[in-house]
Structures are given as structure tokens and as C-alpha cells.
Image (cartoon, rainbow, N blue to C red):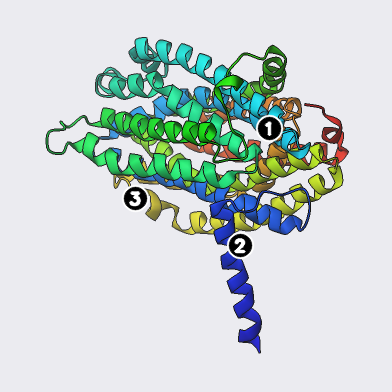
Amino acid sequence: MTNNQHTPTLKNLFKSFIAAVTGKETEFTTGSIRKAIFMLSIPMILEMMMESIFAIVDIAYVSQVSVNAVATIGLTESVVTLVYAVAIGLSMAATAVVARRIGEKDIPGAQKAAVQAIALGTVVSILVGTLGFIFAKEILALMGAESDLIAEGYGYTRLLLGGNITILLLFLINAIFRGAGDASIAMWALVLSNGLNIILDPIFIFGWGPIPEYGVMGAAIATNIGRGTAVLFQLAVLFFGWSRIKIGFADMVLNLKVMFNLLRVSSGGIAQFLIGTSSWVFLMRIMSEFGSEVLAGYTIAIRVMLFTLMPSWGMSNAAATLVGQNLGAAQPGRAETSVWKTGKYNAIFMGLVSLVYLFFSYDIVAWFNEDPVVVANGGLCLQIIAAGYVFYAYGMVVTQAFNGAGDTGTPTKINLLAFWLFQLPLAYLVAITFEAGPVGVFAAITLAEVLLAIIAMVWFKKGNWKRVQV
């Protein structure tokens, strides 16, 4: 009898999984909330896992080049996170506006928002790419890199910043798909992007046949090719109408009203993530004071951390879409229930992951680099940060819920308090002034994320986000 009860359940679960990754379910404002979370979360989790798998594979290949190569990636990506801040800020606005229009059954309005978002992203990426390509060496020097590291790694920095349009548009167009409820298309775009990256990485890093050995710069070449190909796929989907949103040549005109609305919503989102990501830049600058080996351990730990934070971020993105669409459908109660349920599922997942990191952190870091200093610092970093994982789970979901409602201002204020006014001063005082070393930075990261989660949940319960118009 037990088997008979379980068989249909497993069969239905498998059917739901297939429906989620193929995008067959597109209605999320009616029916079971649990099913809606599942249908949106599965492709978003798989999408983010593909991103984090690439991050792990990338650092594994580059670790075979040199410690300087790993440190180069750490320093460059701490700067690239500023590009991510703009990309994610624009993406939040795109998701919020598109989801709201979809909830209102206004498909033409969603299409207009998509076009204006892509136009904004293109302009920003060209400006950033030009500056990054010209001043790559100066950027690394500003981050505290030593001369030998700059000589070995500036090619990577130049190509990654110069080709940032592939990063920005990949983020942005996937956000449009997610807002429309087409999470499976966003997932397949990243499968294509990161699949190519993983295949091309060793070819360009170590050389193969007629392709010379580019070292760490080869990782940037592979990344640009992989992400650029995925952006072409995304544009094909939009133009050929394979999603709920179809863009024609008639739609490709500037609409100042829609663009200013996107800028209004995204300005809070960009500020929000600039606060968060610039704090990572300053933390990386503090870490560079302790040498390349410590910096490499920290970089590996952060990459490993992303492996589990990305799926968690996927669930958080599901919450953003559910909030946006349900507010558009005039169902604020359903939107709020979706957030708390998503938070609970995320906390269970993150709690289990934290146990793995607490017990096996040093072994995990040693897979990537066996240098004792790298392993000691990377392992300790993983353990301390994992101690706050359950708080991160709720913090991410609730913050994304605000963003999905178009209330990007509230998380900006919370980030300002948690990161700039708390995390950075604490990290500097403990690590440098009190000479506790890297552990001061690790502890500041965890405590700041715990503080952020608590403030976000208290603020969310007030319910002001339900009245935001986008």
C-alpha cells in the first residue's frame, strides 16, 4: 500500500519537473502556490547551478596555471561585480515591470519594457567595456595587485571588462524571460553559455591543436564566446516569438515614458547592488594586504560558496516573479504567502548545505589548491560564512520579494546599513586595526548578512511593498 501511494507521487513529481524545465506551465496567479514555486524555482535553480558549476570549473582550470592567475580572477571579478550591479539593477527593474504587465495581461506593455531594458543595457555595457579595455592594468594596480600579477593577468581583465556586454545582456534578457514566467528559456540560455565555457576553457587556457596556450587570458576568451553565443540565442527567442514576449522591428523604437519608468525602478536596484558589490571590492582590497596565497584561498572559498548560493538565488528569483505577477493580478495576499513559503524551502536547503561546509570545508578547498596557506584560509572562510547560511536564505528571498514588487528603495537602505555602515568598518577594525587578520573579514561577512536578514524580514512584515506602483 505504501508503494502504491509513493509511486503516483514520484511519477507526478517527475512530470512536474519535466513541465518546469520545458516551460509548459505559465500561469502563476491562480492555483497551488506550492506548485507555482516549484514550477518557477526548478528552472531558476538549474539556471543558477549552471552558472555556479562554471565558476567552479573555471577556477579549477585556472588553479593549474598559478596562484597569481587565481588571484587575478579574484581581483578582476571583484571589479566586474560593479558591472553585475548595473546588470542586476536593470534586471530587477525588467523583472518587476514585465511581471507586473504579465499579471495585468498587458503583453504589449511587457514587450515595450523588454526593448527599452535591452537598449539601456547596451549603452551602459559599451561605456564600461571601453574604459575596462583601455585601463585594465591601472584597475588591477588600484586593487593592490603586485607588478608580476599585473603582467600575468591584465589580458584576462582587459578581455573580461571589454566584453562585458555579453555578461550584461545575458543577465538582462534572462530577467525579462523570468518576469514573463518563461524561466525555462532563461535556464536553457545558461546551459548553452556555460556548457560552451566549460568545453572551451581548457582549450584556450592550455592550448589545443592550432590554438596557442593563453593561460589565464584563455578563461576570458572562453567566457566571452560562451556568453556571446547565449545572447544570440536569447535574441533569436525574442524575435521569433518562442516565449510569451515577441519583439518585432516595429517595437524597436525609443519609448521615453517606459524607459524613464525602468530607470526609476532600476536606479534603486543599481544603488542597492552597487552598495553590496562595492563592499566586496573593499573586502577584496583588505584581503590583498595578506598576500596572494591568502587571497587565492578567499577567492576559491567564494567560488565554492557561489555553488550553493546560486541555487538559493534561483529560489529567490522565483519569489520576485510571483510577487510581481500576483500584485499585477491584484492578489497581494497570495504574493506575501508565496514569499514566506519560498523562504522556508530556501532555509531548509541552505541549512543542509551549511552542515557540509562546516565539516568538509578544508577538504573542498584542497581539491582546487593544495598550498597549506591557501587551504587554511579558504577552509576557515567557508566555515565561518556557512554558519549564517539559514539567515542568508531568508535575507535573499525577502530582498528579492521587495525587488519583484518594484520597491528597490527598501533593500537599498538595508544594504547601506548592513554593508557600508556595519560590515566594512567591522572588517577593517578586526582584520587590520586589531590585527586579527583574514578571520576579521570572514566574521564581518557573516554578521552583516545575519543583520540584513533580520531587518529585511521585519520591514517586509509592515507590508508597504504591496502599494508600490510600477
- N-term-proximal mark, 1 vs 2: 2
Q: Which residue is mark 2?
A: 16
In this rendering, the answer to whether 85 lies above or below 394 is above
Q: Quadrant of residue 12?
A: bottom right
Name the residue nearer the viewer: 345 or 184: 184
Tell me how far mark 1 sits from mark 3, CA to CA.
44 Å
Name the residue nearer the viewer: 121 or 87: 121
Image side of residue 134 versus residue 103, left or right: left
Residue 435 appears in the figure: no
Q: Which residue is mark 1?
A: 98
Give me the residue at 16% from left, 32% from top: 211
- Mark closer to the observer (1, 3): 1
- N-term-proximal mark, 2 vs 3: 2
Give me the residue at 81% from left, 36% from top: 459
In this rendering, the answer to whether 142 lies above or below 398 is above
Residue flagged by tag 3: what amino acid is it?
A: Ala
Q: Rate crowding at label 3 as few (under 14), some (14 to 19) or many (20 or more) other CA atoms within 10 Å.
A: some
Q: Residue 18: x and y, percent? A: 55, 60
Q: Which residue is mark 3?
A: 366
Q: Describe the element under mark 1 as helix, strand or loop.
A: helix
